[in-house]
Image (cartoon, rainbow, N blue to C red):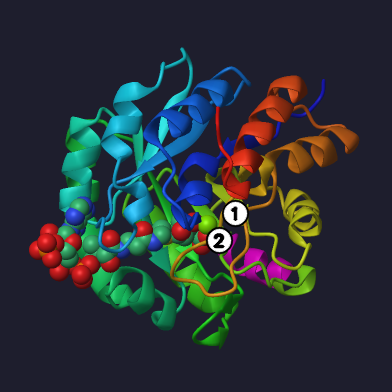
């Protein structure tokens, strides 16, 4: 039987959060509605963060209200604090994500908190989520390289990832936030994280700045990871990570995985359709 690998679509969040110009809510909804037909189980569509920090995500509640929810798809949202959690609950997100960093420099730049302070903020979110059976995913940014602190030790990543997992995150997504990871350094990081979290609870989240994301996915597959985040059309970046390019493109990951004999369950024709919509948004001429 063909082995399954899941692609977690993050384009409507990680992709669009970084677009310079405002994108109309109706265009975001059209992109998500297209993606909902492609066969994903999880799509990250919203981010309940401060609109002063990330204005592009200010219409997250409207996006969640406007999309046609497909059966079997979980629509996810980022929540940095309890205010974000309340927003996600009110908007009926199906799952949420807290986001930490393996480096102090990025933690401070991205969420204005030390790593330790970020865990103090996440604790009540995880507790409240447990009470309403809301699944919580955890992100770790800068798993090999940080735009502020430079090279990151694998042990630092294992520490932060393990803390998220022990706190109740059902899956921890490992972010090469600025797309600089060399495959051998990524492999060393995975070896350290796998000491504390099983491969079945990990995901790879690789930005493609230097064109190594697909190679890093192959390295991760050989370490047993079977979930990868990607953004259709290669949308994205992070506004607080200078130099971060888009996430690896969903359609490229699908093609590579298929070539390696894995099954993604995705419809390549619909992915192509969504990539056209996404690229038009990036080019600034979205009229979808
Ligand atoms: P702060 O300034 O330290 O906190 O920001 P604050 O509590 O003083 O709040 C500042 C203002 O934001 C206040 O408004 C709050 O009310 C408001 P004011 O009183 O000035 O009018 N506020 C909020 N508004 C809406 N929703 C909220 C919320 N919280 C506060 N939830 C804070 C701290 C965490 C809020 C801020 O730093 C922030 O929003 N950061 C988010 C940055 C972000 O979204 N980055 C991108 C996502 S992470 C990423 O892309 C990486 C990832 O893809 C993985 C990878 O690639 O590595 C996940
Ligand atoms: Mg990212």
Residue in the picture at 77% in, 27% down: 263
Quadrant (top left/top right/bottom left/bottom right) for the N terminus: top right
Disc 2 target residue: 175
Per the rendering, the mark at residue 73 is none
Q: Is residue 188 magenta?
A: yes
Report the front residue among 246 and 143: 246
Q: Are marks 1 and 2 in contact (CB under 8 Å)?
A: yes
| Few, some or many residues within 10 Å of mark 1 (<14, 14–19, 20+) | many
- Seen as rendered, the residue at the extreme top is 71
Left or right of 136 in this view: 61: left
Q: Helix, strand or loop at disc 2?
A: strand
Q: How far apart are marks 1 and 2 (CA)?
A: 5 Å
Residue 117 location in percent, x, y? 24, 73
The magenta segment: 186-194
Disc 1 target residue: 205
- Residue labelled 2 has its Cβ within 8 Å of some atom of ligand 1: yes
Q: Helix, strand or loop at disc 1?
A: strand
- In this rendering, the answer to whether 56 lies above or below 148 is above
- Residue labelled 1 has its Cβ within 8 Å of some atom of ligand 1: yes
- Looking at the rendering, which quadrant does residue 51 occupy? bottom left
Residue 27 location in percent, x, y? 47, 31
Indicate which disc, 1 or 2, sits on the residue closer to the N terminus: 2
Quadrant (top left/top right/bottom left/bottom right) for the C terminus: top right
Residue 253 location in percent, x, y? 75, 42
Residue in the picture at 35% in, 48% down: 57
């Amino acid at each position: 039987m063909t082995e399954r690998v899941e692609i977690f679509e993050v384009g409507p969040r990680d992709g669009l959060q970084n677009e310079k110009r405002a994108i109309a809510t109706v265009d975001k909804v059209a992109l998500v509605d297209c993606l909902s037909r492609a066969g994903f189980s999880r799509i990250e569509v919203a981010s309940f963060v401060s609109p002063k920090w990330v204005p592009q995500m200010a219409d997250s509640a409207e996006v969640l209200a406007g999309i046609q929810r497909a059966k079997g798809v979980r629509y996810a949202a980022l929540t940095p604090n309890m205010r974000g959690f309340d927003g996600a609950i009110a908007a009926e997100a199906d799952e949420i994500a807290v986001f930490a960093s393996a480096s102090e420099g990025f933690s401070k730049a991205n969420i204005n908190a030390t790593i330790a302070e970020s865990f103090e903020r996440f604790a009540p979110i995880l507790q409240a989520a447990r009470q309403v059976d809301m699944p919580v995913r955890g992100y770790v940014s800068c798993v090999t390289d940080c735009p502020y602190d430079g090279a990151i030790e694998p042990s630092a990543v294992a520490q932060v990832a393990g803390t998220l997992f022990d706190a109740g995150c059902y899956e921890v997504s490992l972010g090469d936030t600025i797309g600089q990871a060399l495959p051998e350094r990524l492999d060393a990081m995975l070896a350290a994280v796998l000491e504390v979290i099983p491969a079945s609870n990990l995901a790879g989240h690789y930005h493609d700045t230097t064109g190594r994301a697909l190679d890093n996915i192959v390295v991760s597959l050989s370490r047993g990871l079977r979930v990868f985040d990607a953004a259709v059309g290669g949308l994205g970046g992070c506004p607080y990570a200078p130099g971060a390019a888009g996430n690896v493109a969903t359609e490229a990951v699908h093609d590579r995985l298929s070539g390696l004999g894995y099954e993604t369950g995705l419809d390549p024709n619909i992915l192509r359709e969504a990539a056209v919509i996404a690229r038009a948004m990036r080019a600034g001429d979205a009229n979808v």
